[in-house]
Image (spheres, rainbow, N blue to C red):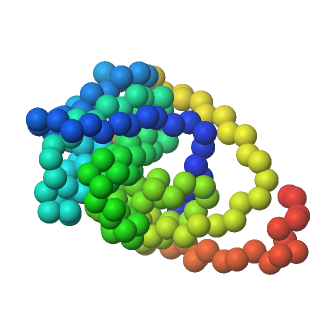
Amino acid sequence: ATVYQAVGLYEDVTAATADEWGVTVRGRDAELVPTDESNLALRAARALADHTGGQEPVHLTIHKEIPVAGGMAGGSADAAAALVACDALWGTDVPKDELEEIAAGIGSDVPFLLHGGTAVGSGRGEVVTAVLAKGRYHWVFVSSLACGLSTPRVYAAFDERTAGTTLEAPPPARSHPRELGRRG
């Protein structure tokens, strides 16, 4: 199980019709973001075009605010935004469950980024269930590495280190209502 929590840091993604597929990135760490076919937002736009029977090419413009390789799902958020932007631009009105399926093909956390709020992810993280979260949360993010960490490389290193071992976690359980008010 994965617990997802949206925060107030975001990026702007716009889609415009173009003669060929492309992406431009501006803002924080823009030089660190790929602008080729490996860009998640561009991959999402192409996946939606394929799903809907082919659409005219788009050029995506991403204004970055989320630190690159900071573990905050910036690329995945851009992919989710590209799906929504392209669906609106092309007027394809793809049902939400189909958008979620396309999103899951791009990355395990992309479906959550179509939802926002607070949610629990199951499966690889792509099966998203919204949860009620009361209160107001204040988050502080501190980057301790100058170079950042690649999420795929972090998971690959984990898989390598735990190969041949069995890791089991108990399934998530609901808290008893009386426990919700307790502080530890």
User: Which residue is at a point 54% across and 28% down the rendered structure image?
Assistant: 144
Q: Where's residue 145, x and y in %?
A: 48, 27
Count numbered badges in the picture: 0
Establish if 1 lies above or below 113.
below
User: Which residue is at a point 16% across and 43% down the rendered structure image?
Assistant: 57
- The residue closer to the viewer here, 115 or 84, is 84
Establish if 17 lies above or below 2.
above
User: Which residue is at a point 70% across and 77% down the rendered structure image?
Assistant: 174
Left or right: where 9 falls relative to 161: right
Left or right: where 59 falls relative to 123: left
Q: Where's residue 142, x and y in %?
A: 59, 30
- The residue closer to the viewer here, 147 or 178, is 178
- The residue closer to the viewer here, 125 or 88, is 88
Left or right: where 183 falls relative to 172: right
User: Which residue is at a point 43% across and 22% down the rendered structure image?
Assistant: 28
Q: Where's residue 126, x and y in %?
A: 41, 65
Using the rendered image of the protein, determine whether residue 24 is visible from the camera's viewpoint. Answer: yes
**The C terminus, quarter of image:** bottom right
Q: Find residue 97 and report its image quarter.
A: bottom left
Using the rendered image of the protein, determine whether residue 148 is visible from the camera's viewpoint. Answer: no
Q: Find residue 108 and report its image quarter.
A: bottom left
As drawn, which residue projects farthest toward the left? 19
Q: Where's residue 168, x and y in %?
A: 50, 73
Left or right: where 140 falls relative to 100: right
